[in-house]
Each structure stands twice: as C-alpha cells, then as structure tokens.
Amino acid sequence: AFGAGGAKVISRAFFEQGFAVRDVVIFDMAKSSIRGSLRDILINSGSRIIILWAGTSSTTLILQNALANDVLGPRFIWILSSSISLSS
C-alpha cells in the first residue's frame, strides 16, 4: 500500500539492522489482489515471518487472502502495521 518506494525504504532499514528481506509480495491496488500466488510465495520461502506494511483496508484484503490460502496460523508469524478487527 506504500508502493515500491516504501518497500525500498523498509528493506534498506532492515538491511542496516542486519535483517534480510527475502521476498516482497506485491498487492495490486487497482485489482485489490496479490500479484502471484500468496500461498506459493510463502510456502516456498524459507522465511516464516511476514511483515505486512499496509493501510487498514489493504491489510484486511491481504489477510482474507492469507486465510483463504491457509497461510495464517502456527506456521507463519504475521506482524501488522495496521490495527484491524479479527471478529468479522
């Protein structure tokens, strides 16, 4: 939700702290969907920590996609930049 520039900034900040960004998942705002298969991207990655840096409405859509693709729960740790309600 913060564009390619935002992804570069956060990737650089993580790198400077000794963290590696292995993959970047792109959420297409125009189509309200993730480019590619979220399940394939996450399952095939060695990483199990996902940092979701997006606005509230995009976060909701991305988490709905993650839930539908069974990539929430005990196998993955999701860190969100937005507060959302999980009750709906």
Image (cartoon, rainbow, N blue to C red):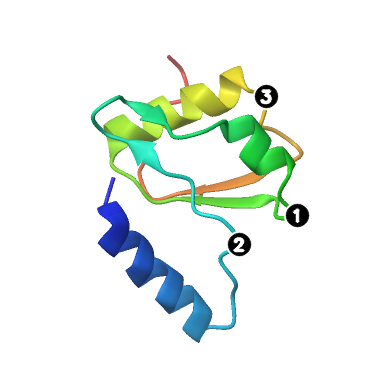
* The quadrant where residue 21 appears: bottom right
Residue in the picture at 39% in, 68% down:
10
Please tell me how crowded label 3 is: few (under 14), some (14-19), or many (20+) other residues with Cα within 10 Å.
some
Secondary structure state at the residue bearing disc 1: loop
Residue 20 versus residue 74: which sits nearer the camera? 20
- Report the quarter where the N terminus lies: top left
Residue in the picture at 67% in, 24% down: 70
Q: Earlier in the sequence, mark 1 or mark 3?
A: 1
51 over 74 or under it: above or below: below
- Residue 70 circle label: 3
Left or right of residue 54: residue 68: right
Residue 74 in view of the camera? yes
Instruction: State which mark lies toward you, 3 or 2.
Output: 2
> Is residue 84 in sight in this rendering?
no
Q: Amino acid at mark 2?
A: Arg
Residue located 51% across and 24% down the image: 65
- Indicate whether 60 appears above or below 4: above
Cα separation, mark 2 vs mark 1, equals 9 Å
Q: Are marks 2 and 1 in contact (CB under 8 Å)?
A: yes
Q: Which residue is mark 1?
A: 46
Residue, disc 2: 22
- Locate residue 53, reporting x and y percent: 39, 51
Q: Left or right of 5: which side holds 63?
A: right
